Amino acid sequence: MKLALKFIIPAIAAGSMLAAAALPSSAATAKTVTATPRSSITVDGTTYYQIKNHDGKCLDETGGSMKEGTPVQQWTCNGNSWQYWAVIYNDTGFALVKNYHSGMCLSVKDNDPNGGGEVWQWPCSNSNAYENWDPYYTQSGDWYTYYNTAACDFPEQDSCGWHPDANSTANGAIIYDQVVSSTAYYWETGSAN
């Protein structure tokens, strides 16, 4: 059974309210929201945020894909629904990072325990350690590093975190899980600008 939900999204830049289309609650159905970038979307009690990296790019599901195994990338923040993510803590004490548009969670490609694995979307599972992330406060502003709990000898100091390919600042740079070594691994949750 599919349920439809109507909700109102605040348009931060315009200072007004925009009516959104009826959205199915099924994760298998595409959800399209087009509006001025905003800080969050709340549906069924779960809040989804834009997650922005140190260079101002948003964590983005490549092409708005609904397909499992699609890599995530960085892209200019634009308000597309595939740029919104929920950080959902589970009974392991770590978090799943779930995409609003696809309903899937971030994971390390092929459960690669070594540094350098692509970060991609996969069906959510609390029991898959490669989908469990530790948002670690960097002690600098509002910046966090998202460590994977199964790769690179977590929780040691050389643990792996989200990182754009080759420190790129370009749109379309794929996100990898690599040993943290610079501010390119810093991410801010909830920013709209």
Image: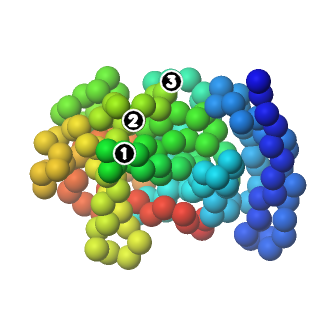
Residue at image point 40% right, 46% down: 90
Q: On the image, numbered disc 1 is attached to which residue?
A: 91
Q: Position of residue 56 (x, y in %)?
A: 49, 62
Identify the amino acid type marked 3: Glu
In the displayed structure, does residue 51 sit left or right of residue 37? left
Q: On the image, numbered disc 2 is attached to which residue?
A: 126
Q: Within 10 Å of the Cα at label 2, are there few (<14), some (14-19), or many (20+) other Cα atoms?
A: some
Residue toward you, 26 or 90: 90
Find the distance from the CA under tag 1 to the CA under tag 3. Answer: 24 Å
Find the distance from the CA under tag 3 to the CA under tag 2. Answer: 16 Å
Q: Are marks 2 and 1 in contact (CB under 8 Å)?
A: yes
Q: Where is residue 105 in the image (x, y as percent from the top left)?
A: 47, 36
Q: On the image, numbered disc 3 is attached to which residue?
A: 68
Find the distance from the CA under tag 2 to the CA under tag 1. Answer: 8 Å
Identify the amino acid type marked 1: Asp
Q: What element carries label 3?
A: loop
- Taking the view exactly as shown, the residue that stands out farthest to the front is 91
| The image quarter in which residue 112 lies | top left
Q: Quadrant of the N terminus?
A: top right
Which dot marks residue 110?
none
Precedes in sequence: disc 2 or disc 1: 1
Q: Within 10 Å of the Cα at label 3, are there few (<14), some (14-19), or many (20+) other Cα atoms?
A: few
In the displayed structure, does residue 106 sit left or right of residue 11? left
Identify the amino acid type marked 2: Asn
**Mark 1 or 3, closer to the camera:** 1
Residue toward you, 172 or 178: 178
Q: In which quarter of the image is the C terminus?
A: bottom right
Q: Is mark 2 on a helix, strand or loop?
A: loop
**Mark 3 or 2, closer to the camera:** 2
Precedes in sequence: disc 3 or disc 2: 3
Q: Within 10 Å of the Cα at label 1, are there few (<14), some (14-19), or many (20+) other Cα atoms?
A: few
Q: In this view, does 41 lie above or below 15?
A: above
